[in-house]
Amino acid sequence: MRLRALPVLSLTLAALSLLVARPAAGSPPEPANPLKLSFKVIMYEGGAPSYYPLGDEEGASMGHVITHFRRLPGAAPEGRAATVRKLLLNHSREGNGARVSVFAHGEGGAWTEEEKVAEYFVAEGEEYTVMELLSYGIEPLKVGVVRRANAEVPPPSVSNRTTSVEVVSIEVKEAGPTYELRLRNNSGKRIRAVEVRMLKNEQPGGSRSRFFSGVEPCAAPGESWTMTLEFGWNFKVGEGGHQIEPPNRVIVDSALFADGSYEGDAGFAARAAAEDFGRRAQLARALSLLESWRAPARASALHAHADLTARFKTLRTTADDALMTQFARLYPGLSSAETAGASAAVEQGLRHVRGRVLLDLERLGKKLSSETDLDSLREWAKQRAEMVRRVMAAR
């Protein structure tokens, strides 16, 4: 599900045959009839590639978190490289290829932020090795873009195990390829999260999806919304290219309400509540930063933008003991094992908020120039602070 939860991959990475990676180039023109394409990741030399569909629409994107990578034998990196705990891999459709960005995420010591390692434009049929990972003491991975075979994507059957959520419709979006699921809150409470599973012949056919309604954090009684369900991640490739496998069943499994009650799986409710707790904690930090920030004296808009971005990068995304103690007090019914397991979900919420603000700042930065008035940046900060207040009040 886009912009809400990243699919987590456990990857062992090695690349013994190293190619020279091409630096990022300008965006190629969008073709009139986009090719069907998929993104490819080679985990290690001789290993089977993993494939992920690239949407047909310009800018269609997906992100992955890589937590199991291989450090170089005998490498003893110092400083930032020593604290890398995960890699973030983003790819987005750009003409007849993909813009690929690789980030290293540091935890521990003084470094607790994402740092961009590399960015490439990879055209269809091309493959590159992320050589920049060598400086972090990590074996490089390979990325590429391949053609995707045309495939019929029929609508799946839908099972609903809840009474609080009504399934209004499900529609196939061929350009994704995705399903667009429209739901309605059929209860008298505000719904904060919904769990949806996809199955292919009764086996998992995609990631578990959770709904958080973006800026407005809950669905009111009677309110409808849509969920975008991504699928087609597998290892199959044939003469026509990567062969996706659409799921044949979608299950609406559980719902979490704004008051903390739930319908369905208690495990899902605990994870969803923990993720929402992380988001609320980071929203409070973001609001404090926005309210207290003042542009440096005699700074240009570009310098002030860099200062604000640097400050947001200092927002921690680790679930420290103090934060988890606070969470346990809010949910005293959880076992110690459940509370410990919730830390990853709390961190997901922390990352989500910080990531969204940094993405907004990155987009804003592309519009700035040496001629930009500093007041435009102050107004941006004022508007974002007001939006955060509305979100927090709604929770």
Image: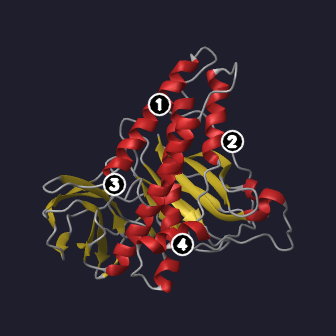
Q: Residue at x 46, y 82 (%)?
A: 338
Q: Secondary structure at mark 1?
A: helix
Mark 4 lies on residue: 325
Labelled disc at residue 23: 2
Distance from disc 2 to disc 4, alpha carbons, whole Å, reads 45 Å
Instruction: Decide which of tag 2 and tag 3 comes sooner along the chain.
Output: 2
Q: Secondary structure at mark 3?
A: loop
Q: Label 2 neighbourhood size at 10 Å, few (<14), some (14-19), many (20+)?
A: few
Distance from disc 3 to disc 1, alpha carbons, whole Å, reads 20 Å
Relative to residue 234, is residue 162 drawn left or right? left
Circles 4 and 1: CB atoms closer than 8 Å: no
Mark 1 lies on residue: 382
- The answer to whether residue 91 shows anywhere in this view is yes
Residue 68: give x, y in percent of width and height. 63, 73
Relative to residue 273, is residue 376 drawn left or right? right
Mark 3 lies on residue: 395
Distance from disc 1 to disc 2, alpha carbons, whole Å, reads 36 Å
